[in-house]
Image (cartoon, rainbow, N blue to C red):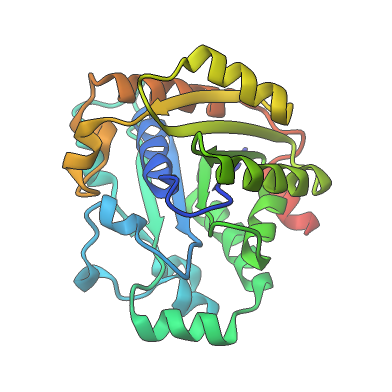
Amino acid sequence: MSEIISIHSFRGGTGKSNVTSNLAALIARSGKRVGIVDTDIQSPGIHVLFGLEEDRIRYTLNDYLWGRCQIEEAVYDVSAVLKQKQTFFGRQGSVFLIPSSMKMSDISRILREGYDARLLNDGLHNLVRRLKLDYLLIDTHPGINEETLLSIILCDVLVVILRPDKQDYQGTAVAIDVARKLEVPKMLLVINKALPSLDFKELQQRVQNTYKTPVAGILPVCEEMFDLGSSGIFCLRYPDHSWTQKINAIAKQIVSVQGVQTGLARLKLH
């Protein structure tokens, strides 16, 4: 049964797309079929991390939402980035990406006209079924809006990313309250861009006590991440780095989570 994982943050700049791409790569490297949908339509970009050049992109999520194509026509197989040398118990993992448009005219149209969120619901349902995905990761738009609420409703696991910052703390409280009202089966917090000088154990305990939600891990600021500059997937470039070890531990927690309802069942209900 497929699991739907929404990765969300209340504010921009938390590293949400970077965390999403690394989680997807690590889960796929374990032999799973993983889909990623960039629903951050107003400020897209996760395709850059996977090296998907714009001249390769014929259709995007925008085109599907505007009735220009079927959902499967906007899917791009980016599994080559994994550089797998051997199969995992006879099965290689795969990553399939649906990007959003980077064209200013398309972004302006979304801001001006919006779209029918029910089409996104139907598209995700078809995507999981047709690609036979083990996991579908949804890179959401920051804050709380219609597509964010839909992504939260659909998911089996909600991962909320925050920085150790007072504004992030306040916004995260809103996001968690909304998720609880929507009865999300499982929530996890990921603290990103933490200074290495912080006491991580104390920070984790304080955040867990504040939100009554488990902290899956704390990702530190690292110089190599800035050097990479979104030109690739960090965990694949630096497989032995301590940051990679931490994101790998988070990935293992996510895939071990079993939701009360499967993503497909929740899609049908909503």
Tell me if residue 67 comes above or below residue 228 in the rendering: below
Q: Provide residue 183's location: percent of width, then percent of height.
A: 81, 43
Q: Visible in this render: residue 58? A: yes
Tell which of 82 and 142 is nearer to you: 142
Q: Provide residue 134's location: percent of width, then percent of height.
A: 52, 39
Q: Provide residue 79's location: percent of width, then percent of height.
A: 28, 45
In the image, what residue occupies the spot 58% across and 87% down?
113
Tell which of 115 and 267 is nearer to you: 115
Q: Quadrant of the C terminus?
A: bottom right
Tell which of 150 and 262 is nearer to you: 150
Q: Provide residue 116's location: percent of width, then percent of height.
A: 65, 78
Q: Visible in this render: residue 69? A: no
In the image, what residue occupies the spot 55% across and 24% down?
216
Q: Is residue 155 left or right of residue 58?
A: right
Q: Is residue 94 left or right of residue 223?
A: right
Q: Quadrant of the N terminus?
A: top right
Tell which of 235 and 28 is nearer to you: 235
Quadrant hosting residue 261: top right
In the image, what residue occupies the spot 49% across and 38% down?
163
Q: Is residue 218 left or right of residue 185?
A: left
Tell me if residue 159 comes above or below residue 97 in the rendering: above
Q: How many marks?
A: 0
In the image, what residue occupies the spot 35% across and 42% down?
94
